[in-house]
Image: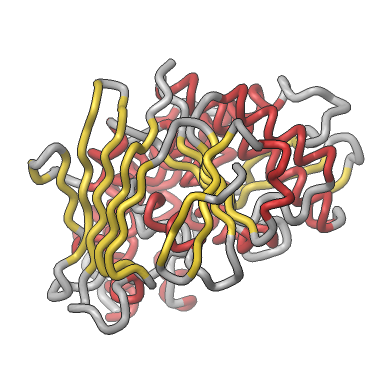
Amino acid sequence: MHSPHITRLTLTNFRNYAALALDFRPGAVVLTGDNGAGKTNLLEAVSLLAPGRGLRRAAYGEVAREGGDGGFALHARLDGPNGEAEIGTGTSGNDVPGEGGRKVRINGAAARSAEAMLEWLRVVWLTPSMDSLFTGAAGDRRRFLDRLVLAIDAAHGQRALDYEKAMRGRNRLLAEGSRDGAWFDAIEMQMAETGTAIAAARAETVRLLAAMIERLPSDGPFPQADIGLAGELEAAVATMPAVEAEERFRRALAEGRERDRAAGRTLEGPHRADLIVRHRPKAMAAEYCSTGEQKALLVGIVLSHARLTGEMAGMAPILLLDEIAAHLDAGRRAALFSILEDLGGQTFMTGTDAALFSSLKGRAQFLTVDHGTVTATEGF
């Protein structure tokens, strides 16, 4: 299994960085500095080497540095599965908002889509905003799950875009009071096809991830989680052939038009699914666990997924762990660092206190971030 790693990252007009070039080594990279110094901005830049809007899900106009020309650029040189590669992405400042406004170039040539970056590296992240994942809205858990799926199934992002586009078209017909059966039939056929594929991909990822979680020691620092999916279509793909589940979903959409018209939106489909997580040792739903237990559960899931990604994609993912050490006790921190070394991929970690990472001295690259400047940390 290959372990792709970024060797050099160059930023232009990105967040609080007017211009920055950094060289990285394989393995652990620790970024320390005060709150607001720009640590998470660096992780966000790396997260944009994956499809989508990055770990903050920010509009591209927000990513561009205030006082700049309205656009941003980032360039990464990496040692990838097929040798060295150059990936560049950014906006010109004149682009329309949305995913279509971000351009991607790989080895000097325009990429057909952002998904092309998945041929070279996979990026997985864990941020403080995800600490409320189990108690927050189902939409947050769906997005989390879809990023897990995308890391091992490069086609998942396009499926999701196609489904959302078709659903918007159906919702527009509902809002306009249209009774054009042929239009509805065509859109619902596309929704059934892409929606069933989305549900099946999610179900397969959950199945594979559950098997990987089984490898965690039952008495380890990161407890085993029982994970599953809730949703009518998700239940269907688990119990019948995909073609039958697709036809059943298509019929449900057709029969539900008047109900959905009254609601003003489509009420059934993979956009309503939920990820269900339970703390196995305590036999308790994750949302009822303590904050510390939820964090440990989430870390265990992300680490298991990183292993799964390595096995399925043939390359260890680049992990972005924002403020990861602050809420872990010393034992769990030591266990985390050991597991990260075993995974073998490049990992970027941030924190305000370098002492929390002191056990990595001599085994990690330490950098200090100070409001637009980044320097090697003395003594590490």
Q: Residue at x 31, y 75 (%)?
A: 65
Is residue 102 something that shows in the picture?
yes
Nearest the camera: 67 or 144? 67
Q: Residue at x 69, y 28 (%)?
A: 338
Looking at the picture, does residue 125 appear above or below residue 139? above
Looking at the picture, does residue 346 appear above or below residue 323? above
Looking at the picture, does residue 331 appear above or below residue 142? above
Where is residue 212 drawn, in percent x and y? 64, 24
Nearest the camera: 368 or 178? 368
Colour pattern? secondary structure
Question: Where, by quadrant of the figure, is residue 305 drawn?
Answer: top right
Nearest the camera: 127 or 140? 127
Residue found at the very far front of the displayed protein? 379
User: The N terminus lies in which quarter of the figure?
Assistant: top left
Where is residue 263 drawn, in percent x and y? 49, 76
Residue found at the very far left of the displayed protein? 109
Is residue 145 something that shows in the picture?
no
